[in-house]
């Protein structure tokens, strides 16, 4: 019989290990983070997918990354209106207050959000009764381009192309933020579009000069 408390018990056990490593042993690195605050050099914007935890995939330590995760790793365009802008607020804080030096948009294969967009593009619109539909409307231009460029491919290939084009759209949207645009222009900030192929264990990066994703893997 499945133990319904097992997922919570696993988290509690994990915290106990964390406490032993960083507090009971007085880990000086973590204690310095507590005492001096965070100074990450990288803003990492990834997908909420449980399989692509950035700390695990990229082997980072506490304090290395300022992380934003959402459905399909989407960056909305900059706008000031009556809405609540959690992703945009986090970007503003990372750039203005933390003064990060790099922003990485990290997409991945088999993304459930992008797959849903490709299977039911008619549901992705700003007046959708569902919050996911409204959110995925931001990636609808990526779907439209993938469908136009690859009209005869199967759903897997279509989703693959849409995943990659959505990263490029998010990079473009980052440049609509005045604070991002200013720090990029001054040379204090660099933008990166990464794509993680889970099936192959490969990482690639968008090269705007070649117009292609190029391997970062060994």
Image (spheres, helix red, strand yellow):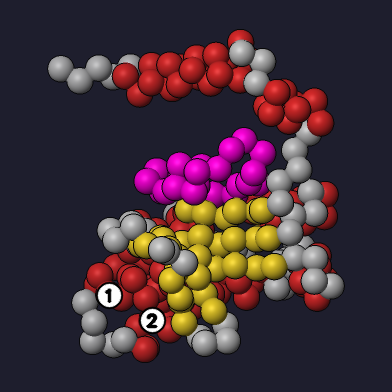
Which mark, by number, is residue 157?
A: 1
Q: In front: 108, or 35? A: 35
- Identify the image quadrant of residue 154: bottom left
| Residue on which disc 2 sits | 146
Which residue of the protein is positioned furthest toward the left in this rendering?
A: 1
Q: In front: 120, or 145? A: 145
Instruction: Determine whether 143 is above or below 83 in the image.
Output: below
Q: Which is more foreground, mark 2 or mark 1?
A: 1
Q: In front: 37, or 48? A: 37
- Identify the image quadrant of residue 113: bottom left
Q: Nearer the N terminus, badge 2 or badge 1?
A: 2
From the image, which quarter does the C terminus lie in? bottom left
The residue that appears at 47% across and 67% down in the rendered structure is 216
In the rendered structure, which segment of residues is drawn in magenta?
Answer: 48-69
Would residue 172 appear left or right of 149 to someone viewing this image? Answer: right
The residue that appears at 45% across and 42% down in the rendered structure is 56
Q: Determine if the magenta segment contains residue 63.
A: yes
The residue that appears at 61% across and 13% down in the rendered structure is 25
Give me the C-alpha separation between circle 2 and circle 1.
9 Å
Residue 46 in the image: state x and y as whole percent: 52, 54
Whether residue 92 is visible here, answered yes or no, is no
Instruction: Determine whether 36 is above or below 177 in the image.
Output: above
Q: Secondary structure at mark 2?
A: helix
Whether residue 37 is visible here, answered yes or no, is yes
From the image, which quarter does the N terminus lie in? top left
Residue 111 in the image: state x and y as whole percent: 37, 59
The residue that appears at 28% across and 58% down in the rendered structure is 199
Q: Determine if the magenta segment contains residue 160.
A: no
């Amino acid at each position: 019989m499945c133990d319904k408390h097992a997922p919570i018990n696993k988290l509690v056990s994990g915290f106990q290990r964390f406490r032993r490593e960083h507090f009971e042993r007085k880990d000086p690195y973590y204690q310095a983070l507590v005492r001096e605050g965070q100074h990450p050099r990288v803003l990492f914007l990834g997908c909420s997918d449980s399989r692509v935890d950035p700390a695990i995939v990229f082997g980072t330590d506490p304090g290395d990354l300022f992380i934003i995760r959402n459905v399909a790793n989407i960056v909305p365009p900059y706008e000031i209106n009556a809405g609540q802008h959690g992703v945009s607020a986090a970007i503003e804080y990372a750039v203005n207050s933390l003064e990060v030096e790099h922003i990485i948009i990290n997409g991945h294969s088999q993304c459930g959000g992008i797959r849903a967009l490709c299977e039911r593009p008619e549901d992705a619109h700003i007046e959708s009764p569902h919050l996911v539909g409204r959110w995925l409307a931001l990636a609808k231009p990526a779907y439209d381009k993938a469908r136009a460029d690859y009209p005869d491919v199967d759903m897997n290939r279509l989703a693959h192309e849409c995943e990659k084009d959505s990263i490029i759209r998010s990079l473009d949207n980052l440049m609509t933020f005045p604070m991002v645009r200013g720090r990029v222009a001054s040379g204090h900030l660099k933008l990166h579009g990464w794509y993680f192929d889970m099936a192959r264990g490969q990482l690639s990066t968008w090269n705007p000069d070649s117009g292609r994703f190029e391997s970062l893997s060994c």
